[in-house]
Every structure is written in structure tokens, then in C-alpha cells.
Amino acid sequence: MQRGLTGHYIALPSAGENALAFVPNPLPPNPPLNLDRGLQDLLDKATLALGRLDGLASALPDPAIFLYSYLRKEAVLSSQIEGTQSSLSDLLQFEVGGVAGVPLHDVQEASNYVQAMTYGLKRMQDIPLSIRLLKEIHCVLLSKGRGSTAEPGELRRSQNWIGGMRPGNAVFVPPPADQILDCFGALEKFLHNDPVKTPFLIKAALAHAQFETIHPFLDGNGRLGRLLVALLLCAEGALHEPLLYLSLYLKQHRQQYYDLLQSVRLTGDWETWLQFFLTGVEQTATQASQIARRLITLAGDDEKRIATIGKPAGSALRIHRLLQRQPILSIAGAAKVLHLTVPTVTASLGRLEQMGLVREVTGREYGRLYAYDHYLKTLNEGTEPLS
């Protein structure tokens, strides 16, 4: 359904240019959404796929095995949409003190994303999803590297824009700074089911689009808007852990993603945006469940192989379990976590390397890092940097 413009324009004083900023109407859409049979079917499929993913994670004896890697996969993918070139392997190496093969700023952005998500999930135990919380998360997201000078944690006090060199030739100009608090406040009410209660996936789709339209910060809006989806699904109880990396789908359909956000603003066609979003949730949740099952099978097969090596199997199996949680690790780090001696860890990793299960990735004599090779390759699917 095309409702026409979903907001109004305000003229900006911009050195004589006819620059207009867009101020969105509050959610929910008016007239109300048309959840026809096709859209309702999509909603049901996406909800079911999300439930299966959450159920799979909940049934695991140690959900942290997947949470560590899935969260970092989402961080890498979300940052790649913004133009970074870091891979999952780069981030994992960086976090254990290795040297990534990309510019430091790129991998730092992905690392910040992990810290911001972790902070947000922990903080939601004390305060609800709100402007206050999003400002705090934004502060963590831009704490280091690029963007650290763009007023982390503060709503913008100046005009920003998307595309072009200035507001006058930009693709999209968000609301003026003096409109941000009102727009953001209305979005916060919508998140809390004011004025109406909204199904959680519909809420996530609408809230993400609205956040991107408001663009309340000088930098980091895209990443925080994608973080908002995962945080909202956890806040609503749809996911117990942030295992849905929707950024994979958005990365693969980047131009369509941008086009549909703009179409919502100009035509009010929320239904087409919902089709796109729900399809992404269903596909991504299904893929995540499939990868989890493949990883479980792979780890199980490798565990059986390790168990056949006799007496050394005890420490080797402990390191193998740690590698499932942390697919790249250092000898010193593993020794500390597992309370084993450095010689024991070194010998065990040597055996695993001889078996073809791990691979040394630095080529150095000292400070070596070992990757759980086939496991990491499975996780890496879809995380190749955009050209």
C-alpha cells in the first residue's frame, strides 16, 4: 500500500541552497498496515524460523559455544555494510592479541560492535530499551577508532545527510537537530507499545526503518540501527541470545535495503519493506540453524577422532571444547583459561595440528595463534569483505 509521504519537509538554512530535511510521522503507520495473506504467511514463517533458532540454542548444553562466534559474525557483517574490510578471522585474531591483515580502524569498528552489543544486553537487565540506553550503547560503539570524535553517546546538534557532498545534493536529509528529541521520543513510545501493541517482528522492522530515518547521531547510525533489531528481539523474549545476524542478508541485498528505506519515506509503502525484512529474518534464522547443526556435527566427529589418541586425549579434548567457543586462540590464553601448563597446551595443539584439526596462522616462532580450521571456515561463510 502506498500512503504517500510519511512525514513532512522543513527548509534548512544552507548557504542559499534549497535544502529540505525530512521529519517522519510517529509510528505506527497511518493508515494501518495491510497484513494480507501473503504478508501474514511471511510473518508466520519468520516467527517460526526464529523460534527454531532460539530453541536450538536453548537446547545446547553450552549456548556460549555459538554466542561468541555468532555475535562476532554479526559485528563483522554490520561493519562491512559501512565499508570496512575486516573479516571474522581478522576480528578473532585482533581480540587475542594478533595482527589483523586489514587497517586497524576497520577491525576496531567490528570489535566496538561486539562490546556495544554485550554492554546493551547486560544493561537491559537494569533499564528498558530506551533513548537513554541507546545513547549509552552508542558511546561504547564509537569509543575507539573512527567516529570517536563524533560525539559518542550524544544526540547530534548539527545537520547530517546521506549521500552527496552537502544537504543540497544529498540523497536523503534526516530531521534537523532541534527535531531529534521529539522524533526519538515518539520512537521510544512505540518500542513500549504506545499507542498500540505491535507484534515483535513487525515492531523490529518498523523501528529499524524509523531509526535510520531519524539518524539521531553524527556517526554510527547504521550499525546502531542494526544493533537495535537484535536488542529488541532479545528484549521482547523472541531470542534469549543475539544469534540472528541479519546483517548478512542486508549486506547481500545492500542496494535494495537502501532503496526500500527511501521508498518508505517517499511513498509510505511499509508493506514492501516488511516483505523484505521478514524474508531476511526467515532466511537468516534458517541459515543460522543449519550452520549450528553443521558445527555440532563437525565438532562431534572431531571429538571422536581426538578420543582415539590415548592418554593425551584428555587435555586435547579440553582445548578442542575451548576452540568451539573461541575458534582462534593463543597458547598462553588457552593455558590461562583451562588452568593447564604452557607445555601441555603446546603439545596438545601440536597433536591437533598433526591431525589437521587446527592450523597455526601467524607463521611466527613466538606468540603463535591457532585456528580451528574447518570450524572457522564454516563460520566464515558470507563474511567475505565487500569489494
Image (cartoon, helix red, strand yellow):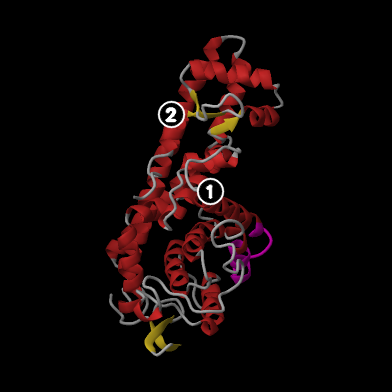
Q: Is residue 169 above or below residue 380?
A: below
168 on left or right of 223: left
The quarter of the rendered structure image containing the N terminus is bottom left
**Residue at the spot 34% in from the left edge and 78% down from the top edge:** 169
Residue range highlighted in magenta:
123-138
Mark 1 Cα-neighbour bin, 10 Å: few <14, some 14–19, many ≥20: some
Q: From the viewer's perspective, is the residue at label 2 or at label 1 nearer?
A: 1
Note whether residue 297 is visible: no
**Residue at the spot 48% in from the left edge and 39% down from the top edge:** 89
Label ID, residue 104: 1
The CA span between labels 2 and 1 is 26 Å
**Residue at the spot 40% in from the left edge and 79% down from the top edge:** 167
Q: Secondary structure at mark 1?
A: helix
Q: Is residue 125 magenta?
A: yes
Q: Closest to the observer: 60 or 131?
A: 131
384 on left or right of 113: left
Label ID, residue 374: 2
Toward the top, the furthest residue is 310
- Name the spot of residue 378 as percent of width and height, x first: 41, 35
Q: Is residue 310 magenta?
A: no
- Name the spot of residue 144 as percent of width and height, x first: 60, 56
**Residue at the spot 56% in from the left edge and 35% down from the top edge:** 326
